[in-house]
Amino acid sequence: MHVHKPLPLVYGVPQKSFYKDFRPTMAFVAELRPGLEGTRVVAKELLRRHVQPVVICDNMMAHCMERGLVNDVHIFYGRLTKKKAVCRTGSLIAVLCALKHQIPAHLHRGRTGRAKGSLLMLGGRKVAPRGIKTFAPPTEDVPLIYVDPALRGSGRGRG
Amino acid sequence: MKESVLFWPVRLEDKTLYILDETKIPEQIVYLKVRDYRQAVDAVVTMKTRAFGQFLTVVYAFILEARKAGRASPEVLMLLFEKIADAFNGSRPTFPFEEVTGMVLGMARGIGGGPHFHAVLLRSLEGMLDGIRRQRYGRAEAAARLLSNGERVLTHCHVSGEMALIGAICRRQKKRVRFFATETRPYLQGARLTAWELKRAGCDVTLIPDNAVAKVMADKKVSCVLVGSDRSAKNGDFANKVGTYQIALLARHFNIPFYALVQPSQRLASGRDIPIEIRRDDEILTFEGRRLGDKKLQAYYPGFDVVPSRLVTRHIAIDPTSRGPACEDAEGDGRARA
């Protein structure tokens, strides 16, 4: 499909409470490799609430932002300290790219449990050579200096 | 030095073109047998071959048809060549097919007619391919010179066998270089091709998901980025597989040098002029026929993105006017600026 208007981008797995206030007509959902929770879990939750998910791969976020197709970024933490949020890996990409493109990044409570799925598999099929070394950390630290204090915990989506 | 099969993924034997089916790797090394230019165009459209394989497919398709045409007059052959050019030019938008087909047509027009038209044309095209092979080796040598002992290189997508060659050159020079390959969704060229060929070349390679790029940079696991390109603009901007722009932004943020293997072109003024191919939703939402999510999902799949020249620490260029190695320094000192 082609996208012609800016949409909010959801990166990570929110808690159920997030969806109450998130009422755009459409939203980008990052797929979240290796487990594809974005495609499978988040997109399903959005569909149930009549929000049309538009799935993108995790490597497409900056391009969508650069083309003016993203108006808000939403990331989700499992643990929060004074200086950092522990989020699903890739959240730091979402936040830094949002910062570079002057797009507001919102931080919400979410789920960052152990990522399911293997980097060697996709859709039940083997996708990488035998014996290859992999590095797929489930979480990463997002320094809070990259998230506007006013946007920690908010998150009404537009679009 | 043994070449990766992906370094020169197309070959012509008599009147059959053998195109490496890159979608079958790593399970199998299978070549599609192509007997006319229409089948060659189909191999491009269905992404059985990509990047440099596309370039070779175009040039070899002209040679194949010239061979098949036998004693046809130069005028008849030129008409056929124009049809072939049109078919490739309309196949996929981002790769510069017009430049490649224009180069071949220009070469054929330059020869004019004459009794030796066929022979001269075939010799010229084959000579051009030999030159390109040497230039690619030269570019790999230039890239290897940029890598120090202990370098930890992040790469994205696949550079048609050149990364494995760079790894092999570094090994020959007794430099220990470690590679991190992003898997490169949705077609997984990083997992299926780059990681596979680097491992086969005896290189130390670790596969990471596309979303772990900032993590490996923040943790100082990578010391530079080295990527290929599909199309360049006059000002040094270039298009490559989607995800490259994201990596370039992050490299700049973390002050990591970002190197790009490029083919300079004067045709387009800037990266903004490069058309971005939007591919079908199901290429993200299905994998090998299996649905990955709900049937009501939609997807957005830009095949490429554009990296502005300002984010490139150094362009490592193939110079079409020379036959030797070329390394063009875009920012002087070769290190990223914050």
Image (cartoon, helix red, strand yellow):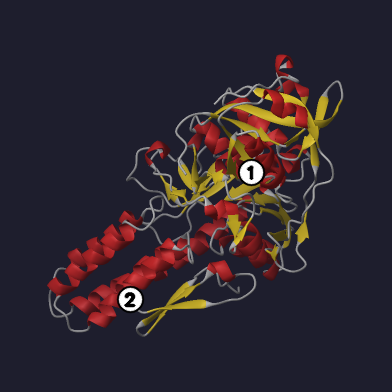
> Can residue B169 be seen from the camera position used here?
no
Q: Quadrant of the N terminus of chain B?
A: bottom right
- Above or below: residue B238 compared with residue A108: below
Q: Position of residue B189 (x, y in %)?
A: 59, 59
Q: Which mark is residue B36?
A: 2
Q: Position of residue B139 (x, y in %)?
A: 51, 57
Q: Quadrant of the C terminus of chain B?
A: top right
- Above or below: residue B190 compared with residue B264: below
Q: Chain of mark 1?
A: A
- Above or below: residue A77 compared with residue B290: above
Instruction: Residue at 71% x, 19% y: name it.
Output: A154
Report how many numbered discs are placed on residues in the image: 2
Residue sitting nearer the eye, B231 or A110: A110
Task: Check if mark 1's residue and mark 2's residue have beta carbons within 8 Å.
Answer: no
Instruction: Residue at 47% x, 30% y: name it.
Output: A5
- Horizontal placement of B145 versus B304: left or right? right
Q: Position of residue A18 (x, y in %)?
A: 73, 27
Q: Which mark is residue B10?
A: none
* Helix, strand or loop for disc 1: helix
> Can residue A151 be seen from the camera position used here?
yes
- Horizontal placement of B129 versus A40: left or right? left
Alpha carbon of mark 1 to alpha carbon of mark 2: how far?
A: 38 Å
Q: Position of residue A140 (x, y in %)?
A: 79, 37
Q: Chain of mark 2?
A: B
Please rate how many residues cluster around mark 1, counting C-alpha atoms within 10 Å: few if below 14, some from 14 to 19, many from 20.
Answer: many
Q: Which image quadrant for residue B191? A: bottom right
Tell me the amino acid under the disc marked 2. Asp
Q: Which residue is mark 1?
A: A58
